Amino acid sequence: MSSTGGRIAIVLALVVVGALAVSILKSRPQVSQTVSIANCVATPNSVTLHYANGDQVQWMGDGQTYNLVFASSPFSAANFAVTGAQAVSSGPISTAAKTCALLAYFSGGCSYKYTITSSNNSCSQDPIVVVQK
């Protein structure tokens, strides 16, 4: 094989490997961080999401109805209703939160507090969602 033919074979192999890597990354499932809410307490109190991984939050209730409200949300919605024992997903991280996380890369990302309210309890905890690249 000539040196030109060898170079072409190497380039083609790199193209195939690159295409496979892109395909694997696109088909990678989103990662969910689960937060359990029981008696107005979120566990864990803080979750870190990585937008490069497609992370989302999934809240699970204890049977009561809880309302989660972000003053400034890292998602497209700012309010989430967790009813019964159903799981509620945050959906993807917003473009604004991704931009914030990118700009705050060296300081650990951007933090978003949310409040939990319930018709049965007065909740006092303010959990946090941290968004990083």
Image (spheres, rainbow, N blue to C red):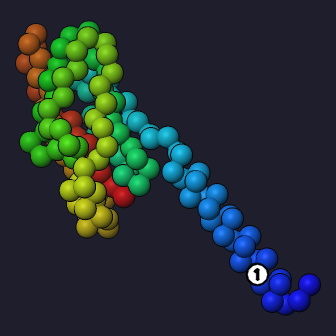
Q: Is residue 122 left or right of residue 91?
A: left
Q: Residue at x 44, y 41 (%)?
A: 30
Q: Residue at x 54, y 46 (%)?
A: 27
The C terminus: image quadrant: bottom left
* Residue on which the image places disc 1: 8
Question: In the displayed structure, would residue 117 be above or below residue 49?
Answer: above
Q: Residue at x 44, y 40 (%)?
A: 31
Give x and y (percent) for residue 123. 11, 22
Q: Is residue 62 left or right of residue 122?
A: right
In this view of the protein, can residue 25 be seen by the observer?
A: yes
The N terminus: image quadrant: bottom right
Q: Quadrant of residue 19?
A: bottom right
Dot 1 surroundings within 10 Å: few (below 14), some, or many (20 or more)? few
Q: Nearer the viewer, residue 3 or 25?
A: 3
Q: Residue at x 72, y 73 (%)?
A: 12
Q: Is residue 116 left or right of residue 35?
A: left
Give the amino acid type for the residue marked by disc 1 in the picture. Answer: Ile
Give x and y (percent) for residue 57. 33, 35
Q: Is residue 81 left or right of residue 28?
A: left
Q: Nearer the viewer, residue 6 or 93?
A: 6
In this view of the protein, can residue 38 be seen by the observer?
A: no
